[in-house]
Image (spheres, coloured by chain):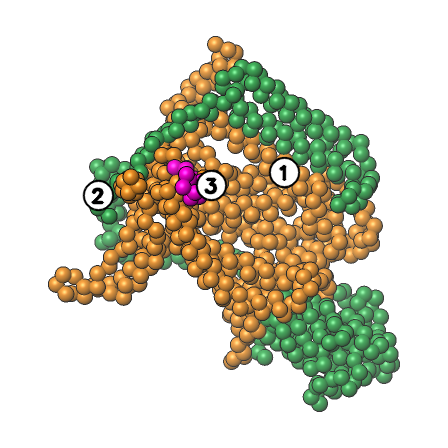
Chain colours: A green, B orange
């Protein structure tokens, strides 16, 4: 583009247009009264808030369209507070817009860069200081300082070591052992096969060993889902079929993806669905993943019945339950 | 002299006697701030941060950040005699037995959502208007840092009550930590003080949530604002506005009154939401139990896109040499977000590399006048929106009678196809808008008024723009593409050969635009008419 082509010129800041309140004293007085009304409304709202706090019972409910049953104490306290604040804000803005000088002013903007002289002075000083410290020449100092500073950051890291124990084998182990009874959760009652109808689902936990308590971290690994199908509906290999008992199959309830509880069972399709990320497992095929982000089936717990006819584990889980981790070997 | 003026004079004198700051203060009290509605977005964020500090402090007076097991004995009947953590029980206590407690909880949660939404809107404003260009790159970086920490802070905050929904969120966070190669299970055990969930996590994240992160926020926000102050605010183009000036209102009194008033309005709106709009009703979810879950588990919106990415990941794990790598967690949970945030942080530097532009900019660009950047922004938003849709796939499926499979496959394909499509469409729209501007400047505004000429022809009356409007529509710079020669005059190959070519190609794409009309053109046209 050559220089003789002319861009549109900047006509400069448009002339200031006076507001009605600038030229008409009556309008200005009216605006003042409007602002005052807003501030008074705010004060009244504060009174409403404090009145509600003290005098409206906090168990008083009433029906409001759209909102349904509403707690009067909470609603009026909140409304009082909200309007107290809103009206202050509206008053201030109205005051500023109507009565404060609204002429736009122009301020100069200076280039952030310093004048060349200052700048070269500054650069020279930095160079001189760097030179005086001798960092360029004394590389031994530079390197050892780097080493010392770098390594000193390790202390706070090392001191975080006692945040927790080492994982050891804990991620692989659950409380399930050979012969552990399956008990209902909640209720802790042992279960017989005949307690479950075909199509039924139950969440179970390992029976507590006497004198031991059950922690949430136990449930996070031990939770198991029992599902009863018709034995003919299974499509399992011989080993996995031997892990079921009379149509009852048991899977870890802890998702093999990210550890959520796989709690949605669709009776028609016999699919288990994790509500977190929708990994879907086919119960008839040993919880094979048929959809979603999980890469592994849910671990199956081998079950049978003991001498008293209660469901028990045949053996511990043969693989780690829950999400994957680096040391997981299968 | 009125009484208030005399007092004001005395105060000013008192301050200057003790600080000698008269010159500096005078200059800064009359500091000029440009006015535009989009500049209020950052203010919303600042004010909601203050609301968060105030309401959060109130909540700490009753909240007990402990996972010690207690039996609930408060006034919420459905959960009476149930075992739960002290954290959950004290949250119930705040909700039902502290007057105004539920209100404050809801104000705190709404303020957090407004804080995040405000940051995202502010970030978009800064991006689409090019406000991040030199000299404001540092403030862009601080902003990206604040958004990142905001996501973490919000997640930790809604995790504190230890209810069934948030506990599930922590479980997922634990799985992400555990998925890290080599160190994952160690880090998880350190963070949780043993096996998940343990009793250490809530007290620990409480300290991070109420002390460490707010402290970092305060420091970063202070620097952010000081830089805005020192570098002076950017302004939109218009008559009288140049790179060398700031046009607006002085800080005292009008800007202070408006900004102060706006703080109360933001606080008032947040309180109104807290009063009438129920949010995070934790008593409906029950206490956390790793063996239970509720259907339709959803994080807050600023985590939803991450959840959507995790949901759409293909089921890939590597099992080799006795070790497992969960690509289905690492890629959507860490690698893609890491790449996205890094690209966002370094974008100012990428753009300045593409354009070779090293000059200062204080006049904002209208998004249409930088089609490539606007298209990149729209493309990124499209990406986030598609994965966010997948983050709510279960909710969408039930509300629109679709299957999760349909939504999952739509978004799996859409996340690859839609963003580039949006890029192309946005760029075309920007160029069309530039053409429309050109048309308007040269031929005037279509008034919609039809006039019949004496010989029967109908024409639409075009109204000429004012000089102010013409200037606003044509003032933007239109730099030429970088020329990176392949070889110099002596035929010596440019050592930057390939890199230079790539740069030239990017630069070419970046400067693609419609020639802005000039006064010369307008005059020539006028001549043609007569």
Q: Position of residue B483 (x, y in %)?
A: 24, 57
Is the residue A94 above or below the residue B449 in the image?
Answer: above
Q: Split into 4 quadrants, where in the image is the C terminus of chain B? A: top left
Q: Is residue B457 magenta?
A: yes
Cα distance, mark 3 to mark 1?
46 Å
Mark 3 or mark 1, earlier in chain: 1
Is the residue A181 above or below the residue B332 in the image?
Answer: below
Q: Is residue B267 left or right of residue A126?
A: right
Tag 2 near tag 3, CB within 8 Å: no
Q: Which residue is label 2 attached to?
A: A3
Image point (75%, 79%), residue name: A249
**Part of the protein shown in magenta:** B452-464
Mark 3 secondary-structure assignment: strand
Q: Nearer the viewer, residue A210 or A203?
A: A203
Q: Farthest residue to the left: give it.
A: B490
Q: Which residue is label 3 attached to?
A: B450
Rendered image quadrant of residue B316: bottom right
Residue B287 visible here: yes
Q: Farthest residue to the top: give it.
A: B1
**Mark 2 crowdedness (10 Å alpha carbons): few <14, some 14-19, many ≥20:** few
Q: Is residue B402 left or right of residue B224?
A: right
Q: Which residue is label 1 attached to?
A: B269
**Mark 1 crowdedness (10 Å alpha carbons): few <14, some 14-19, many ≥20:** some
Q: Position of residue B321 (x, y in %)?
A: 51, 80
Mark 2 secondary-structure assignment: loop
Q: Label 2 marks which chain's residue?
A: A
Image point (54%, 49%), residue name: B150
Cα distance, mark 2 to mark 3?
39 Å
Cα distance, mark 1 to mark 2?
54 Å
């Amino acid at each position: 583009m050559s220089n003789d082509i002319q861009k549109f010129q900047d006509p400069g800041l448009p002339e200031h247009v006076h507001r009605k309140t600038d030229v008409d004293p009556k309008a200005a007085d009216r605006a003042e009264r409007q602002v005052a009304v807003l501030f008074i409304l705010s004060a009244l709202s504060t009174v409403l808030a404090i009145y509600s706090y003290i005098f409206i019972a906090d168990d008083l409910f009433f029906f409001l369209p759209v909102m349904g049953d509403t707690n009067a104490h909470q609603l009026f306290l909140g409304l009082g507070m909200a309007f107290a604040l809103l009206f202050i804000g509206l008053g201030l803005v109205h005051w500023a817009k109507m009565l404060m000088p609204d002429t736009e002013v122009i301020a100069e903007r200076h280039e952030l860069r310093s004048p060349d002289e200052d700048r070269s002075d500054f650069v020279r000083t930095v160079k001189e200081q760097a030179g005086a410290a001798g960092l360029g020449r004394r590389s031994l100092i530079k390197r050892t300082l780097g080493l010392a500073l770098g390594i000193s950051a390790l202390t706070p890291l090392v001191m975080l070591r006692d945040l927790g124990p080492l994982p050891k084998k804990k991620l692989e182990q659950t409380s399930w052992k050979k012969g552990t009874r399956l008990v209902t959760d909640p209720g802790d009652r042992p279960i017989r096969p005949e307690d479950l109808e075909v199509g039924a689902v139950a969440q179970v936990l390992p029976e507590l060993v006497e004198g031991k308590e059950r922690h949430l971290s136990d449930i996070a690994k031990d939770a198991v889902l029992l599902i009863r199908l018709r034995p003919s509906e299974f499509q399992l290999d011989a080993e996995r079929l031997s892990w079921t008992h009379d149509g009852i199959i048991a899977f870890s309830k802890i998702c093999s993806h990210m550890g959520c509880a796989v709690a949605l069972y669709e009776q028609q399709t016999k699919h288990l669905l994790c509500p977190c990320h929708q990994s879907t497992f086919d119960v008839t095929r040993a919880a094979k993943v048929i959809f979603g982000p999980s890469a592994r089936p849910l671990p199956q717990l081998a079950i049978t019945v003991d001498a008293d006819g209660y469901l028990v584990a045949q053996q511990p889980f043969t693989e780690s339950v829950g999400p994957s981790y680096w040391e997981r070997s299968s | 002299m009125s009484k208030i003026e005399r007092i004001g004079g005395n105060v000013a004198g008192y301050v200057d006697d003790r600080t000698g700051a008269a010159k500096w203060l005078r200059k800064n009290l009359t500091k000029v701030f440009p006015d535009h509605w989009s500049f209020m977005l950052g203010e919303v964020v600042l004010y909601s941060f203050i609301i968060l500090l105030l309401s959060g402090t109130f909540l700490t007076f009753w909240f007990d950040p402990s996972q010690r097991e207690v039996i609930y004995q408060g006034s919420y009947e459905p959960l009476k005699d149930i075992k739960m953590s002290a954290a959950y029980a004290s949250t119930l206590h705040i909700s039902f037995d502290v007057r105004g407690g539920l209100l404050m909880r809801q104000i705190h949660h709404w303020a957090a959502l407004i804080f995040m939404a405000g940051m995202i809107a502010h970030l978009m404003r800064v991006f689409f208007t090019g406000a991040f260009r030199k000299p404001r790159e540092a403030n862009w970086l601080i902003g990206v840092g604040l958004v990142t920490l905001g996501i973490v802070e919000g997640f930790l905050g809604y995790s504190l009550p230890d209810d069934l929904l948030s506990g599930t969120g922590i479980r997922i966070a634990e799985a992400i930590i555990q998925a890290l190669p080599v160190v994952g299970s160690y880090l998880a055990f350190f963070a949780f003080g043993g096996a998940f969930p343990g009793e250490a996590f809530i007290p620990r994240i409480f300290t991070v949530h109420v002390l460490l992160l707010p402290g970092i926020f305060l420091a970063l926000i202070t620097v952010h604002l000081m830089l805005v102050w020192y570098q002076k605010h950017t302004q939109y183009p218009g008559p009288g506005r140049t790179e060398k000036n700031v046009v607006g209102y002085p800080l005292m009194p009008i800007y202070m009154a408006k900004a102060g008033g706006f703080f109360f309005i933001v606080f008032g709106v947040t309180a109104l939401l807290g009063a009438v709009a129920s949010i995070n009703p934790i008593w409906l979810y029950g206490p956390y139990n790793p063996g239970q879950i509720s259907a339709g588990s959803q994080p807050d919106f600023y985590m939803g896109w991450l959840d959507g990415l995790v949901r759409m990941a293909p089921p890939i794990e590597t099992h080799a040499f006795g070790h497992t790598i969960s690509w289905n967690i690492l890629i959507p949970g860490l690698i893609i977000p890491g790449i996205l945030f890094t690209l966002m942080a370094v974008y100012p530097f990428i753009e300045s590399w593409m354009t070779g532009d090293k000059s200062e900019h204080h006049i904002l660009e209208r998004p249409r006048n930088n089609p490539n950047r606007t298209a990149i922004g729209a493309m990124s938003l499209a990406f986030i929106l598609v994965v966010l849709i997948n983050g709510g796939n279960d909710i969408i499926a039930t509300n629109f009678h679709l299957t999760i499979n349909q939504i999952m496959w739509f978004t799996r394909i859409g996340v690859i196809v839609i963003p580039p499509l949006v890029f192309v469409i946005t760029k075309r729209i920007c160029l069309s808008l530039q053409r429309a501007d050109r048309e308007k400047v040269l031929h005037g505004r279509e008034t919609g008024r039809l006039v019949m000429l004496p010989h029967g022809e109908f024409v639409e009356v075009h109204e000429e723009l004012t000089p102010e409007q013409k200037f606003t529509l044509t003032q933007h710079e239109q730099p030429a593409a970088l020329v990176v020669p392949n070889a110099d005059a002596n035929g010596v190959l440019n050592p930057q050969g390939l890199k230079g070519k790539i740069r030239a190609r990017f630069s070419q794409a970046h400067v693609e635009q419609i020639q802005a009309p000039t006064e010369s053109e307008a005059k020539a046209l006028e001549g043609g008419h007569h």
